[in-house]
Amino acid sequence: MSLGKVLDTFSLEGRVAVVTGGAGLYGYQVVAALAEAGATVYVASRNKANNMEKLKPLTDEGYKLRFLEFDLEDEKSILDMCDEVYKNEEKVDVLVNNAVLRCTNGYTDTAENFERSMHANATGLFVISRAFGDRMAKAGSGSIINIGSYMGILGPDYFLYEGTDMNQQGAPGDYFFHKGGMTNYTKFLAGHYGKFGVRVNCAELGGLYSGQNPVFVERYNKNTMLGRMANETDLKGLIVYLASDASLYMTGAIIPLDGGYSAK
């Protein structure tokens, strides 16, 4: 196979992608990567205006972005958003489950907030994955990419936070719980949809540098094999790979993207 043909498999020209979230540092990379590879990207979030503002540099460059509003806590809102996309498009090729509701303040927070987190981040994941997954299955192809975290496969390292103001109420147990659930739910979805040509994979992301406490950053860096936190472009290549025909034989994969943090 020639180099040109290999690179062609990474193209997303003519593809339609849906990304939940998108305004965050990792979410921005997801949207940018898909758009730069040629996809029309629907960005769905709780705050449409905020996403439009944060992603304005991409729309100003002429990338094909569409903005929708939905609530991960509301089943009807999720289903309506799915219907709206399919009203505009013949099919959806890629779904990226990136949105997350962070509503607890550490381990000491209330059971009510923990339950709210589970409703959005676990039940919401189930509803949206089934809504798009069933339609992808009917079309005979598709890629679902779950944005997980190394906290879904590891326990907390409290030493990282000593001497800082981070996680003083204990690490957010709900986040570990639902990201851990996402990890194995990825395998369930891959098994359920595989015979229909729909692939499901999970990217387990490490920490992204965003001006955190220098003490934390130094300790975190030493815990990685590459000696640094993730930057503003590190996720892009993996997203395009998982979304494109370059990964047609990959499904059910749990892929750490953490500089070697979880491999030590």
Image: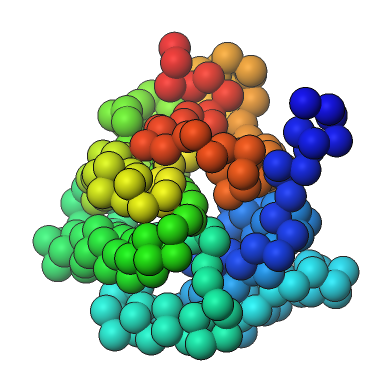
Q: Answer left or right for 130 relative to 59.
A: left
Q: Which of 66 and 243 lies nearest the eye of the viewer?
A: 243
Which residue is at 57% across, 37% downward?
A: 247
On the rendered structure, is 59 left or right of 144?
A: right
Can residue 51 be seen here? The reply is: yes
Figure colour scheme: rainbow
Q: As rendered, which of 79 and 74 lies closer to the eye?
A: 79
Foreground residue among 193 and 24? 193
Q: Position of residue 32 (x, y in %)?
A: 71, 58
Q: Is residue 41 left or right of residue 165?
A: right
- x and y, in percent, of residue 152 in the image: 33, 37
Q: Is residue 172 visible?
A: no
Q: Residue at 57% of width from left, 79% of height from top?
A: 89
Instruction: Looking at the picture, tell me which residue is in the foreground, 149 or 84.
Output: 84
Residue 206, image x, y percentages: 50, 35
Q: Quadrant of the N terminus?
A: top right
The image position of residue 61, as x and y in percent, is 87, 69
106 lies above or below 100? above
Dividing the picture into quadrants, the one containing residue 30 is bottom right
In the orientation shown, which residue stands out farthest toward the left? Answer: 111
Which residue is located at x 80 percent, y 36 percent?
5
Residue plotted at (44% across, 12% down): 264
What number of labels is visible?
Answer: 0
